[in-house]
Image: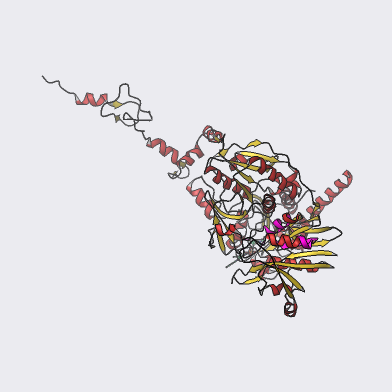
Amino acid sequence: MRTRRDPRAERQAKLVPGTARPRFLVGAAPAGFANAGAATGPTGRPRRDPRASRAAAVVRTAPRLRLDWTNKGQASLAIGTAQAAAAVKAAVRVIEEPAFLVLAVLDQPGGAPSDHDRQLIAGARLLADAGGGAVVAVTVEGVSGLGEAGADRLLALPADLAEGYEPERHAAAVLAAIETLKPRHVLFAESADGGADLARRVAAALGERLFAGVEALSPDRASRRARGGAAEMARAPARLMSVAADALPPHEGTVHEARTIPAPAFEAERRIGAVRPLAVDPDLIPLTETDFILSAGNGVTDWEGFAELARVLGATRGGSRVVCDEGHLPRERQVGASGSLVRAGCYVAYGIAGAPQHLQGITEVKRVVAINTDLHAEMIKRADLAIVADAQEVMPALIRHALERRAERQGKERRNA
Amino acid sequence: MLKVAVLLSIGRHPASGRPRRAPLDARALELALRLPGAEIHAVHAGDPAEPVLRDYLGMGLDRLTVLEIPAGSDPVPALVAHLKALSPDLILAGRCAEGGEDSGMLPYLVAQGLGAALLPDVADLSAGEGTATLTQALPRGRRRQAEARFPLVVSVHPAAPEPRQSAFARARRGLVEAVAASAPQDGFIGECEIRPWRPRPKRLRLAAGGSALERLKAATETKSGQGQVLVRPTADEAARAIYEYLVEQRVIGTS
Ligand SMILES: Cc1cc2nc3c(=O)[nH]c(=O)nc-3n(C[C@H](O)[C@H](O)[C@H](O)COP(=O)(O)OP(=O)(O)OC[C@H]3O[C@@H](n4cnc5c(N)ncnc54)[C@H](O)[C@@H]3O)c2cc1C
């Protein structure tokens, strides 16, 4: 006698409860398996949850749905909980027993790490990670945030080294660090802020060859320009190297420990003294070098007021092509694609519309202030502080205000003294 | 009398590749020629038959000492030995050569060899009794003054005064004095692989992460500011806002 099968009942028995659409587990289900939310299926393979991955790819829902499938982790991080962000932050990479050390001697113009310094640490990271080494950033006291930049250890030199100009003491401090730590590589910043000088002082004192101005670096090869820029010299990374600006990308991804290690004592003979900054006429500094530019466009008609304002604020004068064409300013003061590409810290634009050719000249500028009568000018969009007003009215007011503030300051100083 | 040594090298024209007066060394010589009452000793290590040396003579030198060393050898030991015998107060050199290794190490090695102080990137100088007052050229057009004791090695910055032209008659009249010198072969450059320089693409500073749209925007659009906008303020309000902003960004000092 054959038993009678009931296909409907069998099918019903295989139904997985608790899912939106009916789902059946065909084949032998392991005993007790009824959990629809499990991460792996009955065969042990990871189970995909298409709904969840789609939800993770949502960048935004309004005004239109946008999905980003390329960068799932990032998208879910962006909309994920603060918890997830905290978990990512907490993952600090610790290198307890490094096989060797790589020193990155930071430049720190003005006491804070520059972009060049971050690139330097990234270069040291590259050399260290190739063989289980650790990066020691040689910095000055009171600097933070180098763990994100990729430094495992911090060696803080006295803070007064960054403030004054004592290249001999600075070199002695770095030499003492090299003496005690015996690093496999030492990287310097090839910069005119003092890094290039420091590298050469240290190399000369050690009697070692400096591979100066490295333009490309990998764990087994470093290359630099030579013969007046016509040739490329390459070899295995030397012990002492200085790295050119913008040759390497900054470090990203992992956060490192940046544990402080003691700085060795040092002594130096002082043969350079009486150091003081000299006052220079800001208007004579070339546009490409200066840090503060006051720039005029077609909206400026009061040229004497403009020159006066530049003098009062201590800025270098620049202008758009239109004003240089008309002869209000000499040609070498033109900013833009066919003029100078400037890298100032601050750019004040009076009556400049912001044509693409002009904006190309100021891509590297950090802060832009725009004064324009037209709210919809491109320059207003580019600006960090935009003022919709007539340039001819603002200029004398600004001159007056600056002079008042200066008089106030001087009065206060006289009272204090 | 102030004794000044100027270290001169042979440059290389960036376009044609032909030998020329090295621009920074010519500036160093110019600075030396401007020092009142200085006794100038010009020194070159290399080939005494090089015609470009005459361009330096034409700037106003009567004689130029050439330490005769073979090409591709290290000039530092020969220069240090020569300068030790000469014992000048002040040694001037360009901050970086052009046409060789161009590492800019030579002034430092000479200073180390002589036990002299060194000041880099000098744009101007004047000499006093036993010390010199120097003006250094810094980035962003800044200048710094410093004093240093003799013996002193100075590396000269491109911001130093333009060198004078070379006068043909003086160049003909000047004397090139060859001195035999020994120089070890420089092994380091032989170890390196040398090939023509090819320009690299400029590295873009791209923000990683974010959505594809954000990355595209970061790569293609001009940077847009923080966008604080004041619409039709009075002139005084506008002036105050601009001034406060400049002070906040430390563009204008409060001291
Ligand atoms: C091949 C090429 C290369 C170029 N290269 C450059 C370059 O290198 N540099 C460059 O600058 N340009 C360059 N240009 C020119 C560029 O396209 C623009 O024509 C130019 O930048 C416009 O200058 P502007 O903003 O001063 O003048 P305008 O376009 O005339 O703008 C004047 C602005 O001032 C405002 N304004 C008017 N009156 C007042 C007032 N009283 N107060 C305040 N604001 C006022 C107006 O609203 C307007 O926004 C180039 C063009 C070409 C074709």
Q: Residue at x 32, y 28 (%)?
A: A42
Relative side of A214 to A200, left or right: left
- What are the residue bounds of the magenta stretch? B84-111
The foreground one among A327 and A266 is A266
Identify the image quadrant of the C terminus of chain A: top right
Would you place residue B82 above or below residue A381 in this image? below
Q: Nearer the viewer, residue A376 or A268?
A: A268
Q: Is residue B123 visible?
A: no
Nearer to us in this view, A78 or A28: A28
Spot occupied by residue B204 in the image (x, y as percentages of width and height): 55, 54
Indicate the position of residue B23 as horizontal and vertical percent values. 68, 67
Number of callouts: 0
Residue A72 appears in the figure: yes
Q: Position of residue A82 (x, y in %)?
A: 54, 33
Q: Give residue A65's quadrant in the image.
A: top left
Q: Is residue A92 magenta?
A: no
